[in-house]
C-alpha cells in the first residue's frame, strides 16, 4: 500500500514546482472558503481588467501611450457603469417591486385555474389531492414572502458595503490596468526562476480567460438587448427585469436558460393567458435561445474555452456549493484553470 502511494507521489510531486503549485492551490481554496466574500471584489476587478485589457492593447497598437490608453478605456468603462446605475438599475428595481406586489394576485389566479382541473380531468387529479397541493402551495408562498422580507431587511446594513465596493472595484480596475506589467513582475519574483508548468498554465489561462470574459460580456449584452426589444415589442410587462435575467442567465450554461424560462413564461401567461401573444412570446424566446446556443456561442467561443458540457455542469454544482453565487459566476474560469493544470502538470514516468 505504501509503495503504491510512494510511486504515485514520486510520479506527480517529485518536481519542486509541482509541490509549490499544490500549496498555492490549497492556499487559494482555503482563501475562497474562509474569505470568499472579501476575495470576490478583487476577482471581479481582475475580471473587468481582463475585459478592458483588449481595448487598451488596441489603442496601444495605434501608438497611443499606455497611460493615456488606460485613462481613455477606464473613463469609457466608468461612464457606461454610471449610465447603468442611473437608467437600468432604477428601472429593474421598480419592475421588481411591482412584480413582487403582483405575486399574490398571480397565486390567486393560479389557484382558480387549478380548481377547475378536477372537473375537467377527474381521472388525473382528485379534489382531495388538489386541496393538499393548494394548502402546501399557500404555506410555501407565505414562507417565501417572509424570507423575501427578512432578506431585504437583513441586507440593508450591507448597502454601505456595496457602496464601498462600487468605489473600490473601479479603482482596483484602474490600477490593475495601469500597473499590469509591474504587478505581474512583482508576483513572478516571488516564484522560482524555473517554472515551466506555471508558465504553461499562465499562457493558457491568459488567452482563454481573456477571450472567455470578453465573449461572455458580448453575449450578455447581445442576448439582453435583443430580449428587451423583443419583449418590449410584444408588450410584455417587466421587460427590463426579464431581459436582464435572460442576459445574465448565459453566465450559467444550460442551467441558466432553463431556469429563466420559467418566470418569462409565467409572466406571459398571467398577462395574456393561452392567447396568440403568449404563443408568440414562447416562439420568439425559443428562437433567441436557439440562436444564442447554436450561432452566437460558437461564434464567440470557438477558440475560447474547450470544456465538455458535463465538466461545465459539474463545475457549476461544485464551485456553486463551495462559494455560492460567486462560485457559479466563476465556474467556467475555475474549470478552465483545472483543465490547464491537468494538461501542464509535470509527470515522471515510472521506471522499471
Image (cartoon, grey):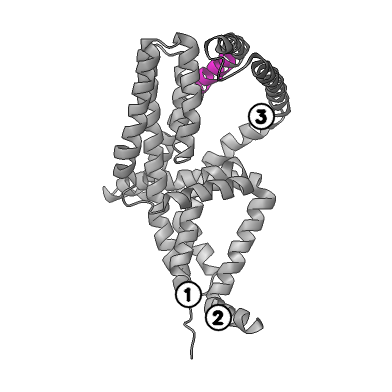
Q: Position of residue 82 (x, y in %)?
A: 48, 27
Can I make out residue 78 in this image?
A: no
Mark 1 Cα shell of 10 Å, populated few (<14), some (14-19), many (≥20): some
Quickly name the residue at label 2. Answer: 14
Q: Which structural element holds mark 3?
A: helix
Within 10 Å of disc 2 (Cα), the crowding (few <14, some 14-19, many 20+) is some
Kindly indicate the quadrant of the structure image that contains residue 226: top left
Of the image marks 2 and 3, the number of the one nearer the N terminus: 2
- Is any part of residue 130 visible from this angle? yes
Highlighted magenta segment, given as a residue range: 86-99
- Separation of residues labelled 2 and 3 (CA atoms): 49 Å
Viewed as shown, does residue 2 lie left or right of 350?
A: right
Left or right of 255 in this view: 138: right
Tell me the element at label 1.
loop
The reply to whether discs 2 and 1 touch (Cβ–Cβ < 8 Å) is: yes
Q: Give coordinates of residue 131: x percent, y percent.
A: 68, 15
- Name the residue that disc number 3 marks: 159
Which labelled disc corresponds to residue 346?
1
For the residues marked 2 and 1, what is the alpha-carbon distance in whole angstroms? 9 Å
In the rendered image, the vertical position of residue 351 relative to residue 271, given as above or below: below
* Residue at the limit of the structure toward the bottom, as seen here: 352
Count of marks placed on residues: 3
Q: Which mark is residue 198?
A: none
Amino acid at each position: 500500500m505504501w509503495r503504491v502511494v510512494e510511486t504515485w507521489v514520486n510520479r506527480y510531486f517529485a518536481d519542486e514546482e509541482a509541490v509549490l503549485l499544490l500549496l498555492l492551490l490549497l492556499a487559494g481554496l482555503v482563501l475562497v472558503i474562509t474569505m470568499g466574500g472579501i476575495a470576490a471584489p478583487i476577482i471581479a476587478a481582475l475580471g473587468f481588467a481582463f475585459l478592458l485589457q483588449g481595448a487598451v492593447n488596441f489603442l496601444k497598437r495605434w501608438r497611443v501611450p499606455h497611460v493615456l490608453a488606460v485613462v481613455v478605456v477606464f473613463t469609457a468603462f466608468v461612464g457606461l457603469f454610471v449610465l447603468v446605475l442611473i437608467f437600468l438599475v432604477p428601472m429593474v428595481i421598480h419592475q421588481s417591486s411591482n412584480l413582487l406586489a403582483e405575486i399574490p394576485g398571480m397565486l390567486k389566479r393560479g389557484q382558480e385555474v387549478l380548481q377547475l382541473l378536477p372537473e375537467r380531468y377527474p381521472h388525473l387529479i382528485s379534489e382531495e389531492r388538489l386541496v393538499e397541493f393548494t394548502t402546501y402551495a399557500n404555506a410555501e408562498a407565505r414562507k417565501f414572502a417572509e424570507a423575501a422580507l427578512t432578506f431585504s431587511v437583513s441586507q440593508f446594513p450591507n448597502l454601505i458595503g456595496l457602496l464601498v465596493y462600487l468605489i473600490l472595484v473601479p479603482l482596483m480596475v484602474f490600477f490593475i490596468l495601469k500597473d499590469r506589467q509591474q504587478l505581474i513582475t512583482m508576483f513572478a519574483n516571488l516564484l522560482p526562476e524555473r517554472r515551466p508548468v506555471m508558465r504553461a498554465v499562465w499562457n493558457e489561462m491568459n488567452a482563454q480567460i481573456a477571450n472567455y470574459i470578453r465573449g461572455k460580456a458580448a453575449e450578455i449584452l447581445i442576448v439582453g438587448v435583443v430580449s428587451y426589444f423583443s419583449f418590449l415589442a410584444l408588450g410584455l410587462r417587466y421587460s427590463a427585469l426579464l431581459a436582464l435575467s435572460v442576459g445574465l442567465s448565459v453566465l450559467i450554461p444550460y442551467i441558466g436558460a432553463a431556469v429563466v424560462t420559467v418566470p418569462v413564461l409565467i409572466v406571459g401567461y398571467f398577462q395574456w393567458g393561452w392567447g396568440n401573444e403568449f404563443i408568440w412570446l414562447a416562439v420568439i424566446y425559443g428562437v433567441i435561445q436557439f440562436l444564442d446556443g447554436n450561432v452566437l456561442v460558437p461564434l464567440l467561443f470557438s477558440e475560447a474555452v474547450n470544456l465538455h458540457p458535463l465538466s461545465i455542469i459539474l463545475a457549476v454544482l461544485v464551485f456553486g456549493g463551495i462559494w455560492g453565487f460567486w462560485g457559479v459566476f466563476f465556474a467556467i474560469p475555475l474549470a478552465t484553470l483545472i483543465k490547464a493544470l491537468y494538461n501542464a502538470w509535470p509527470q515522471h514516468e515510472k521506471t522499471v
